[in-house]
């Protein structure tokens, strides 16, 4: 028979088992952390009707969308988790209780040009809080706490959550009489990190037609920096000239002042006026999260406050705040940077039981009792040489091997080998369980990411 | 602005938050149980190249496949998890260690005609053990133990794992000189439950051209029933006439005899000669699992032993054994039958904290300490009347509400209301954590499914 060469599509992540175990650990941390903050899990379809998914229309992403027909239906794969959330909330509005807090970790699809580290199928891990008509500023204040808890639980140490408020920016441009051009200006200013102040100034003057004075004023404003208190204090110098600015400053003060109570250390948080987020729908606090030692990666967790989640589906005003982690890309980058903890077990089992007798019932009963005790156990009964069986445990990184021969069965004991130390001990099954549990607790105690 | 009516595609399950929480519990049980038996999690792409996914070609499912082009690429959504596994094992053969044990819980796609309880996007939850060239019968014997553990942990009581062996069937047809027609015969016999012995006999004689005698012999054979020992004993009467039959009987004896050591009670297991599984690639033990009170649902967990997982991709002989749960359909059926435990918490949070002061820092600090203690906590700081806030907890089923006013803050205590009993107590935050943890342990102690 002629064979089809097996391959996986370019831009689609498919991990080997040890890496998959690390990914699962990351996902488990996200699920647990989001749950601790009172977010409920959601799972929406990967496929939606194109007219529903693309109700907003246009946009740069449209070309990238996986769109196709099946029978009469015009279908598309979701390209983010926000549009499906908007649809969900509008569709199930009467069955939901607001504020509605949900998390979703799911695959999304974008047919980007394939290149290293870019994915066409990738996980996003999102949380959003949606209000019905109104939403307290506390929700915006809580987001940095969730980001902090998430990344510190994952093991990261050197990261910073950068926060700004769109009302401060919009208010500032209002003061300068530049409200109508604030979108273009912010998109330009957003490039500051990449192209530098001189080039930003040149674009503002040459391309956007601002005066040199206006351009300088803008560059002066966004270069305000220092400690959070210093930045907030410098901002207060602009107060009283725009109600919008003042509202934004008050919100930023609220967000900033509650961080201690939320347990976020000051060094993990920075007010940063250069952050605007490209998307037009953000209207209040905006967030980015950067790895201090890897600024080249860009933001690993971003989001913000918006006023109208579902305006394309409903007249209901549904303000919200949310953040998103691009999990597949983050995982890829962490791998590239050798930041995934190699000491955590990635084996499929904690214990490999090697029966040394023809009759397997004692070995099976032992495996059953280990599993009852919560120990991940594999029986190895293949027709292989003893050495090959040990090598099997070794290759997979299974931390413990149990030998069970006539003598052990007769004596009611097991021979347990710690594969890391090579130490072998004969002990009762109950003591073996205690020993293995203690060893596993230690082996599993580290975090996924090397901070 | 004109609105797009939000809708979810027909045949795509989209759950409300309480139902989603139940689904998550089921998935968590599956992940944990599969892990206990030494299976490693895998995650393969939803999209594959059509030539790879459809290498086997033809088949009834081909019409149902979501197939489309993106640029030059001919793509398809996976329609099961077995073909992607075959591709994975063939592609990564050199990086895997055999026997390779993996589980995968993922969405698959089939464009079936939409009808109640039929899904176009649905979860399958699969486990497979793949050997390199050979695979011990123990793996086939272990499968019923995994099925038993899975369903009993989910809470089911009245279910039965039905087992047969294809070698017994093929050997029997060999004895009758009917080897070449055994496929057609088995497909007919498979309908026994639905159409009865008379009609099966009629098809065998009229359509397949068997003699009345052969037909009677077949019907006599597949009607062998009784306790497992009775069936095995009746089968031994056919021994010695076909090596294939004898091999199958020996395997069936092995599987059956190890059940006690695996902890599977006899009443959950039955040797059933009518089970053949339609698919041609099964070659040894085959499994079905039925709910005793709902035979109309059919099998909720099926699978078997096969000799050649990846024959379309590689010359390597990769025998295996696996089972699959159609999770979305099972969840749907359990819901319809009111078998999902309504007493388990489905709220997004365990505790709702209601701050009664302007300054929120004490409430925030309390929420932070609760979360550190592993309690899922939501702060409710919206501009709402007190009654509305209580009603919020009530609607969501949040089991505990904490009030924090001036007096409580001054006294270093909290007021904690148990929403189920209405009981309210004033106690220290530490005591509140103890109280809530104990309450949650009890509330969460039940299984997902009502047996």
Image (cartoon, coloured by chain):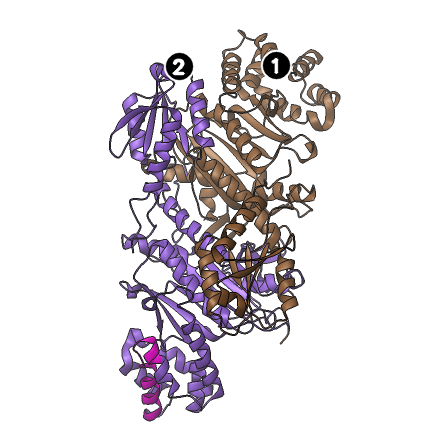
Chain colours: A purple, B brown
Residue labelled with disc 2: A358
Residue behind mark 1:
B231
- Give the chain letter at badge 2: A
Q: With A422 as the anchor, is B246 left or right in this view? A: right
Residue A224 included in the magenta stretch of the image: yes
Rendering coords of residue B174 (x, y %): 56, 14
Q: Which residues are magenta?
A: A213-231
Position in image of residue B45 (x %, y %): 45, 48
Q: Position of residue B159 (x, y in %)?
A: 63, 30
Q: Quadrant of the N terminus of chain B?
A: bottom right
| B61 sits left or right of B217 in the view | left
Badge nearest the viewer, 2 or 1: 2
Question: Callout 1 environment at 10 Å: few (<14), some (14 to 19), or many (20+)?
Answer: some
Residue A255 percent coordinates (x, y): 44, 73
The answer to whether A308 appears left or right of B430 in the picture is right
Q: Is residue A326 visible?
A: yes
Q: Work out whether residue B204 or residue B89 is closer to the camera in this orientation and state it.
A: B89
Label 1 secondary element: helix
Quick one: quadrant of the C terminus of chain B?
top right
Mark pair 2, 1: CA separation: 25 Å
- Please give the chain letter of the residue carrying mark 1: B
Q: Is residue B120 above or below residue A315?
A: above
């Amino acid at each position: 028979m002629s064979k089809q060469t097996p391959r996986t599509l370019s831009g689609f992540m498919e991990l080997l088992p040890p890496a998959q175990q690390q990914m699962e650990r990351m996902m488990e941390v996200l699920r647990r952390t989001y749950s601790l903050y009172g977010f409920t899990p959601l799972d929406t379809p990967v496929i939606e009707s194109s007219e529903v998914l693309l109700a907003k229309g246009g946009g740069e992403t449209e070309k990238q969308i996986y769109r196709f027909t099946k029978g009469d239906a015009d279908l598309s794969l979701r390209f983010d988790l926000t549009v499906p959330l908007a649809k969900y909330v509008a569709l199930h509005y009467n069955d939901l209780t607001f504020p509605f807090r949900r998390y979703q970790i799911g695959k999304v699809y974008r047919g980007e040009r394939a290149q290293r580290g870019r994915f066409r199928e990738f996980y996003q891990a999102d949380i959003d809080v949606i209000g019905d008509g109104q939403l307290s500023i506390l929700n915006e204040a809580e987001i940095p706490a969730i980001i902090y808890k998430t990344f510190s639980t994952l093991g990261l140490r050197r990261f910073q959550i950068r926060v700004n408020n769109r009302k401060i920016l919009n208010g500032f441009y209002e003061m300068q009489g530049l409200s109508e051009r604030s979108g273009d200006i912010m998109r330009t200013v957003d490039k500051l990190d990449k192209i530098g102040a001189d080039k930003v100034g040149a674009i503002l003057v040459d391309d956007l037609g601002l005066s040199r004075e206006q351009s300088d004023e803008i560059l002066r404003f966004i270069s305000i920096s220092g400690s959070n208190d210093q930045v907030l204090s410098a901002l207060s110098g602009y107060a009283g000239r725009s109600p919008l600015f003042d509202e934004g400053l008050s919100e930023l003060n609220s967000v900033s002042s509650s961080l201690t109570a939320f347990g976020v250390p000051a060094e993990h948080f920075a007010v940063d006026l250069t952050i605007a987020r490209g998307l037009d729908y953000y209207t209040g606090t905006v967030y980015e999260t950067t790895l201090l030692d890897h600024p080249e990666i860009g933001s690993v967790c971003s989001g913000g406050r918006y006023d109208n989640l579902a305006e394309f589906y409903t007249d209901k005003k549904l303000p919200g705040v949310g953040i998103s982690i691009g999990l597949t890309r983050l995982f890829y980058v962490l791998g590239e940077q050798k930041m995934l903890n190699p000491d955590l077990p990635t084996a499929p089992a904690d214990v490999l039981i090697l029966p040394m007798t023809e009759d397997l019932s004692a070995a099976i009963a032992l495996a059953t009792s280990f599993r009852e005790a919560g120990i991940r156990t594999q029986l190895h009964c293949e027709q292989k040489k003893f050495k090959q069986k040990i090598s099997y445990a070794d290759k997979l990184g299974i931390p413990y091997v149990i030998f069970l021969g006539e003598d052990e069965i007769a004596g009611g004991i097991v021979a347990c080998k710690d594969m890391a130390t090579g130490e072998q001990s004969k002990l009762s099954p109950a003591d073996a369980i205690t020993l293995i549990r203690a060893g596993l607790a230690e082996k599993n105690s580290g975090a996924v990411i090397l901070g």
